[in-house]
Amino acid sequence: MEAIFVYTTFPDWESAKRITRELLERKLIVCANLREHHSMYFWEGKIEEGTEIGAILKTDVSKWKELKNTLRELHPYEIPMIARIDLDKLNREYSEWMEKVLFG
C-alpha cells in the first residue's frame, strides 16, 4: 500500500459532494476531506475572488491515473487543478484500512 493524497477544488458544495460520492462508489478513493476556502486567482487576465471547496482525496498510488482521468471527466472547471501528494509515512492501522477498502 502506497498512500497518496490528491488535492483539487470545486466551485460549490453540490459538485464537490456529487463527484466525491462518485469517486467513493468507484473505489478510487477511501475518504475525502472537504472544506470551504476563500480563493483569489488569475482568470482570463484579471484577478478573481470567490468561494471554492477544497478536497483532499485519500487513495493508493495505483489508483492515481484512473482517479486523475475521472476527475478531469467529471470536473466542472475548464482547467481543474489536480495535485498528487506522495505520503512518506502513514500509520499501519490506517494503511491497512485503506487497503481493505480499495482492494477488498
Image: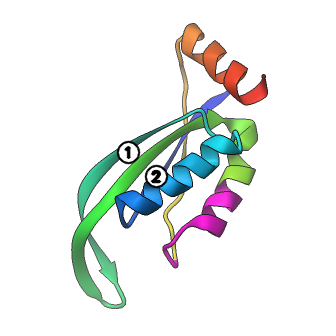
Please name the amino acid that badge 1 sits on.
Answer: Leu
Q: Is residue 27 above or below residue 71?
A: above
- Left or right of residue 98, residue 51 in this image: left
Across and down, in percent, residue 57 comes to 52, 42
Segment colored magenta: 68-78
Residue 98 percent coordinates (x, y): 63, 23
Q: How many marks?
A: 2
- By secondary structure, the bulk of the magenta-drawn segment is best described as helix
Three-letter code, disc 2:
Lys
User: Is residue 71 highlighted in magenta?
Assistant: yes
Q: Is residue 80 above or below residue 22?
A: below
> What's the CA distance linking mark 2 and mark 1?
8 Å
* Mark 2 or mark 1: whose residue is earlier in sequence: 2
Question: Element at badge 2?
Answer: helix
Determine the image quadrant of residue 92: top right
Secondary structure beneath dot 1 equals strand
Tell me: 30 left or right of 32: right
Residue at which label 2 appears: 17
